[in-house]
Amino acid sequence: MKPKDFPKEIKSFIIPKHHGKLIYRCLGCSREYGIDELLYTCPHCGQVLLIFDENFDRLKKIPGRIWRKIFDYRKMLTIPALKGIYLYHEFIGPVIPLESIIYLGEGHTPVIEANAFLQGEANLKFYFKNDGQNPSASFKDRGMASALSYINYLVQKGHTSDVLAICASTGDTSAAAALYASFLQPHVKSAVLLPHKKVTPQQLSQPLGSGAAVFEMPGVFDDCMKVVETLSENYNVALLNSKNAWRILGQESYSYEIAQAFEYDMENKVVVVPIGNAGNITAVISGFLKFYETGIIRSLPKILGVQSEHANPVYRYFLEPDAKKRKFIPVVVKPSVAQAAMIGNPVSMPRVIHLVDLYNSLSGRQNVFFVEVTEQSIMDWELLANRNGHIACTHGGESLAGLIVARKQKIVGQNDIAIVDSTAHSLKFSGFQEMYFENSFPPEFEISPNPDLINTPVYVHPDDLANVPAPGKPLHGEDFERFVQGISSKIAKILSLQKRQKT
Ligand SMILES: *Cc1c(COP(=O)(O)O)cnc(C)c1O
Ligand SMILES: [Zn+2]
């Protein structure tokens, strides 16, 4: 639909204006800084920052009803810059002109209702949101679209040039960073730092394929993070980890999409997210808060953060019911199939502490909850979901396992409706499925396969077949006939197929 054909009521809003006044604000000392320069931590006290819009109140002057209409109609636009996360431009990057926006197909990922069997198992209605259907196959593309659109804007304004974007990664951040940076080459180049052997082969292939400089180092993610922090403090590089508050802004789109997918009715909804570095849950909470403050949604959904027992610092922190007595203690992580969340000292912890408090108080009750799950349950639920029509990654399995725990603990009721985040595509983590099916998990994972979930290929090669075809060596005539018959009857036997009646 062309902008001129939109209803009168919303016509003037349909193309976003960039009237925001964004600033970095420190969560530690409340100091504020302009956004002309990329900042990651407060120059005064070293805390993480969040980006706020000083003109946010202008958005409250537009009634919620009009906003809902704007977003729903915007879906009919064909302008590439507004087809992804920037459909919610006013809430994500209201200083970025449309010409600077990079759109590679991110966002608006499918929300898929679980089948009757799975809903029966979970004992409530729930949906998966398939964030693995983003361009680099994880939700990280949302944040990278935002961070790189902003960098592109700085480049176009002449504020910066020859950017070297750098990140530490458990796999998906580097895949997304390398993809978006490669779109902006030669102005932007990327370098990624990975813990050696702690990312899957698929995840390693992604930044390599995008042409990034890829470094592997000993240790775990937390060690890589320290190195990129040191690099970003001492050298002229652009840090793309979620410490970069632009990432958080982009990832808020996840919440806006959920609101829109459920016609902005957040009553009885539970949004389930896995937690690693805690950037995602920060963004999810922040996104719902913004839609709530502007009257676009009338209630705040319940948020359920899930961690593995093998990497559970956020869960542990919130175990203490008395907020004043809570103390953050980083944990030493153990191997986890939710590998992208294997983080013991989450960078966004101060943001989470700040936002959970705000979210609960605006909800008028506790509305953010945390649970921990076993490695075994992560794999079992992932595989069960995927045997029922889903494409959940291990973190999707982790989220679902967390939902089950929350049901048992009555954090989530039978009449709630859950939206479970499958943060990446199952194919990125197929190695864990393979270990499960082959019962080859190293003992540290503490996973033993449930035989009902194991699946392995059957090689069909009847003993009495002398000749079989091979590449470049096809069979002909009777040999070929015998081969096809032999294989067919073997498969029919294994599957107990009934012979078709001859008429
Ligand atoms: C990064 C990532 C997470 C964890 O998100 P955080 O923002 O680090 O908490 C979970 N799942 C997948 C697939 C990821 O790539
Ligand atoms: Zn500060």
Image: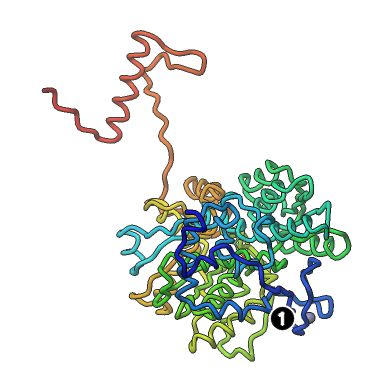
State the quadrant of the C terminus. Answer: top left
* Colour scheme of the rendered structure: rainbow
Residue 210 appears in the rendering: yes
| Secondary structure state at the residue bearing disc 1 | loop
Choose between 129 and 314: the one closer to the eye.
Answer: 129
Query: Hey, what amino acid is under mark 1?
Result: Leu
The image quadrant of residue 281 is: bottom right
At x 37%, y 53%, the residue is 388
Residue 459 place in picture, x, y as percent: 42, 31
In the image, residue 133 above or below residue 246:
above
At x 19%, y 28%, the residue is 499
The image quadrant of residue 24 is: bottom right
Choose between 248 and 348: the one closer to the eye.
Answer: 248
Residue ranking furthest to the right:
234
- Label 1: how many residues lie within 10 Å, few (<14), some (14-19) or many (20+)? many
User: Which residue is identified by label 1?
Assistant: 27
Q: How many labels does the image show?
A: 1
Residue ranking furthest to the left:
503
Residue 167 place in picture, x, y as percent: 74, 57
Residue 181 place in picture, x, y as percent: 72, 50
- Is the shortest distance between ligand 2 and the CB of mark 1 under 8 Å? yes
Residue 308 appears in the rendering: no
Choose between 88 and 299: the one closer to the eye.
Answer: 88
At x 48%, y 60%, the residue is 397
Can you tell me which quadrant of the image ligand 1 is in? bottom right
At x 55%, y 47%, the residue is 431
Residue 21 place in picture, x, y as percent: 70, 74
